[in-house]
Amino acid sequence: MTDRAQHGHHDQHASHGPVTRVGETADETLEHAAHAHDGDHGHGGIGKYLLVFAALCGLTTMSFLTYSSLWPWRDEPHVGWAFMMAVSCTKAMLVVLFFMHVLWEANWKYVLTIPAAMMAIFLAIMLVPDIGLRTRMVSQERALYMPRQSDVRLMEQAGESKLLSDQAH
Amino acid sequence: MNAPAISIPHGHDHHGDDHGHHGHVTLQYQPGLPLSRGKLIMWLFLSTEIMFFAALLGSYVVLRFGAPVWPKPHHVHLSEPIGAFNTFVLICSSVTIVLALEAARANKASLAKIWMVLTLALGALFLGVKGYEYQAKFAHGIYPWSPRSRVFEKPDLYYGSAVRARLGEPAMIDRLKELDDTPDDKLAPDEISARRRLKQIRQMVMSPDQQAFDLAVVADQVMPLPGEGADAHGAHGLNDTFPWLKLPAVIPGGTMWASTYFLLTGFHAIHVLVGLVVFAIMCTWTLNAKRAGGIENAGLYWHFVDLVWIFLFPLLYLF
C-alpha cells in the first residue's frame, strides 16, 4: 500500500483514493500533496533531522581518523581508503534515507534507484579494462614520457640535497 | 470530481452499466507510480544524474588507480580543512532546506522563507570557497587546459627547455635584470635568498651539460613537493616568492589530476549553481503549504548535490 493511501483517512479527498486526478490543476495537486502530509508526522520531525545532522558531522570528522597517530594502518593506505569509502557510504545512506525521505516512501523507490545504481556500477566496471589497466601495456615511447615513481623520488632527493643553499656559504 | 479526459476500464464488476451510459462513466486514472508528477519527474531526473556522476566518479577512480603516479593532495595545493569546511557547509544547507520544507508543510511561510534564504546563503558560501580554492590552483599554474597550465609531469628535457624558454622571454629578461640590479636593502631576507637561488637555476638551465638531477633541483626550487605530513603552505618555491616569475613546475601525475579535479568539481559546482538559481526564485515566493511540493523537489535535487560532494570530498582530498 502507498503512503498516501495509508493516510487517506486524514484526507478530505479520501473518497477519490490514492490517485492523482486527471483534470486537476497543478495547485490542487500541490494542495493535495500538502494535505496528504498533514497527518504523517510519524516521520521526519526536526529532532530527527538534527540527529542525522550530528551524525553526518561526526562521520565527516571520522574520515580524518586515518590521518591521526591513533590509526593503526598507516603503512597500508588501502585500509584507510576502504574505511573512508565506508564512512562516505554511511553518510550517503543517511542523506538519502532521512533528508530525501526515502525511508518513508513506498516501494516505487526501488523501481527508480536500483536500475540506476546497477547501471552506475556496471559503467564504472566497464572502464577498468581499457582505462584502468591502460599502463600495463604501453608503447616504449609512451613509457619514456610517462611520469614514474622514480620521478617523485628524484624530486624528493633534490629537495633534501640542499645543493643550492650549501653553495651560498 | 471532474470527468476524466481519458477513460480507462476500472475493473469493477458493473460492465453492463458502463455500456448503458454511453461514455458517461466516472473512471479513475491510476498513475504508474503512486507519487505526484513533479516528484516522479525529479526522481527520474535524479536517476539519470546518478549515472552521470557515477560515470565521472568511476572514471576518476579508474584513472587514478590505473595511473603509475598520482600526486598527493599537498603536491597539488589541496587543503583538507577547506574541503572539510565545504562538506560541513553543504550538510548544513541540506538541513536548512529540509527545515524549509517542514515549515512550508506546516504553512509557516515566513519561517520557511528564513530557512530558504539560509540555504541560498550556504550554497553561495560553498561556491565562494570553491572559487577561492580554484584561485589557489590557478596561482600555482595548475589549469585544466594546456596553454595556460604550467604543470609538467617529470623533470626531463622538455621541462628544462620550457624553463629556458620562459626565462628567455624578452619581458622576463628585463624583469630579471631589474631584480638583479635591486640593492639588497630594498629586498626582504627571503627575497635575497630566492634571488641567489634563481641566479643559480638560470645558470643550471642554460648550461649545455645538465643532468637529470639538475633539472629535479630546478623543479624543486621552482615549486617543491611538500613531504608527508608537511604543512601545505610551508614549502616555499621561487614561484611563491616572485609571483611574476610563473616558471613551469613539475608535479608527477599533475596534468591528469588537474583534468579530473576540475571536471568533477566543475560539474558539481554547476549543479550547485543551478540549485542556487532555483532557491533564489523560490525566495520570491510565499512558501506556504501550496509550495511544499516544489520545495520538496528542489530539496531532493539539493540533497543529491550534497550526496555527490560526500563522495567527492574523500576521493579528491583524502585519498
Image (cartoon, coloured by chain):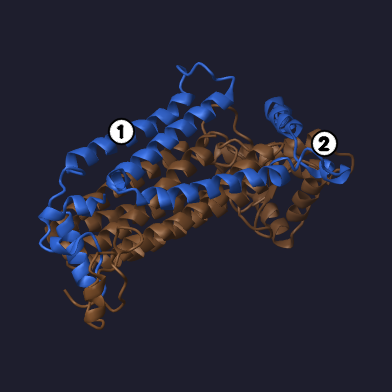
Chain colours: A blue, B brown
Q: Residue at x 86, y 44 (%)?
A: A139
Residue B212 is tagged as 2
The residue carrying mark 1 is A55
Q: Secondary structure at mark 1?
A: helix
Measure how far apart labels 2 and 1 are at the Cα level.
51 Å
Q: Nearer the viewer, residue A127 or B88?
A: A127
Q: Nearer the viewer, residue B88 or A16?
A: A16
Name the residue type under label 1: Ala
Q: Chain of mark 1?
A: A
Q: Nearer the viewer, residue A30 or B139?
A: A30
Q: Residue at x 15, y 46 (%)?
A: A41
Q: Residue at x 15, y 55 (%)?
A: A8
Mark 2 against mark 1, which lies toward the viewer?
1
In the rendered image, is residue B104 in sight?
A: no
Same chain? Circles 2 and 1: no
Left or right: B128 in relation to A144: left
